[in-house]
Amino acid sequence: VAEFDLIERIRARAGRRDDVVLGIGDDAALLQVPAGMQLVVAMDTLNAGVHFPPGTAPAEIGWKALAVNLSDLAAMAATPAWCTLSLSLPHADAAWVDAFLDGFLALADAHRIALVGGDTTRGPLSVCVTVHGFVEPGRALRRDGARLGDDVWVSGTLGDAAGALAQWRGDEAGRSVASTAVDATRAADTGALPTPHDAILRSRLDRPTPRVALGAALAGLAHACIDVSDGLLADLAHVARASGVAIEIDLAALPVSDALRGAFLSERLHTLQATGGDDYELCFTAAPAQAARVELAALECDVQVTRIGRVIKGVGTHAFDAAGNAWHPPRSGWVHFA
Ligand code: ADP
Ligand code: MG
């Protein structure tokens, strides 16, 4: 198949919206922003081997490529509307594109987002998505809004995706999970208990849930917000720097899933949760007086939220263990080109 056949397959399945005056097929899309709203734009790329393990199914890549972008809009309290998709593919593989669209469009349709354009080229597998959304002027949640005395909150649970990646790496290193003897070695080496490839953890890595409804519900309530992509401490450091404050985190308060607790030794949990990344949960600050309203907003969005720390005077991000001792991570989060 040629590039045009692939584009036609994409066009045939792309969602529709009334505010898309002209979608896929012309030199550019024509889009109608609602009167009085600000346009919010984000872009994220997924490269094979960097952002997902080689061999990840195309449907999972499609889902995740859109999910990580929606997570950025969620962190701004924006309501998503449109997206564009740049696909770089080693071969014009129609079956691969169809499967990719299964994942990508499942999430797009769930959020009523229209795919309005893109680019299709030959090259190493890489997926670049932009998302466009709307927010009322003045209501976007920014990194520079944290105030002294704020509580720090996080949605969902942390560390699941990093746990899945650690399990996958354990296998890549050739550690068989078939024999208990080998599993014991693995547990000693990596802190992983002998539970191979936990499916719940893996689905959190491959199909993160962008907290779009929660982000929108936090507008006018939270002071600052960021989505946890590189690792909790690394991402919170951006909030601290932008806001001119310091942030304290209680490691014992970090929300942990049963799946993660069941798969890793407790010493390992702190590192996975505080530095692992790929969580796509929202981390935000709000005045303590707003705690009940934050809980209610989360309840209405059917998302768990947990208070994990506070905003104080100073610089940087500081983590403390259950005994109140300062804790220093092996690394605070993912850094490209490091
Ligand atoms: P041009 O040469 O003018 O850039 P293209 O052949 O790249 O045109 O694209 C033709 C149309 O198909 C455009 O509307 C473009 O936005 C759309 N398109 C191309 N690739 C994709 C894709 N991967 N996803 C969605 N739309 C795409
Ligand atoms: Mg083009």
Image: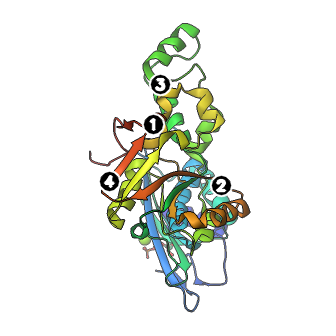
- Residue at x 66%, y 52% (from the top left corner): 304
Report, in whole angstroms, how far the alpha carbon at label 2 lies from the one at label 1.
42 Å
Residue type of the residue flagged with mark 3: Gly
**Is 204 in front, or is 259?**
259
- Residue at x 67%, y 70% (from the top left corner): 112
Residue type of the residue flagged with mark 2: Asp
- Which comes sooner in the sequence, label 2 or label 4? 2
Q: Is mark 4 on a helix, strand or loop?
A: strand
- Residue at x 45%, y 19% (from the top left corner): 174
Circle 4 residue: 316
Circle 3 residue: 170
| Residue 46, horizontal then vertical, whole percent | 44, 53
Report, in whole angstroms, how far the alpha carbon at label 2 lies from the one at label 4.
41 Å
Q: In this view, does 250 lie above or below 246?
A: above
Report, in whole angstroms, how far the alpha carbon at label 4 lies from the one at label 1.
17 Å
Report, in whole angstroms, how far the alpha carbon at label 3 lies from the one at label 4.
32 Å
Q: In this view, does 81 lie above or below 3?
A: below
Report, in whole angstroms, how far the alpha carbon at label 3 lies from the one at label 1.
27 Å
Q: Furthest residue to the bottom?
A: 35
- Residue at x 50%, y 75% (from the top left corner): 140
Q: Which of marks 3 and 1 is in front?
A: 1
Residue type of the residue flagged with mark 1: Asp
Quarter of the N terminus within the rendering: bottom right
Residue 47 makes an appearance in the image = no
| Residue 285, horizontal then vertical, whole percent | 50, 62
Q: Which of marks 2 and 1 is in front?
A: 1
Q: Quadrant of residue 157?
A: top right
Circle 2 residue: 102
Quarter of the C terminus within the rendering: top left
Local crowd size for mark 4, using a 10 Å CA cut-off: few (<14), some (14–19), many (≥20): some
Q: Which quarter of the rendered image does ligand 2 occupy?
A: bottom left
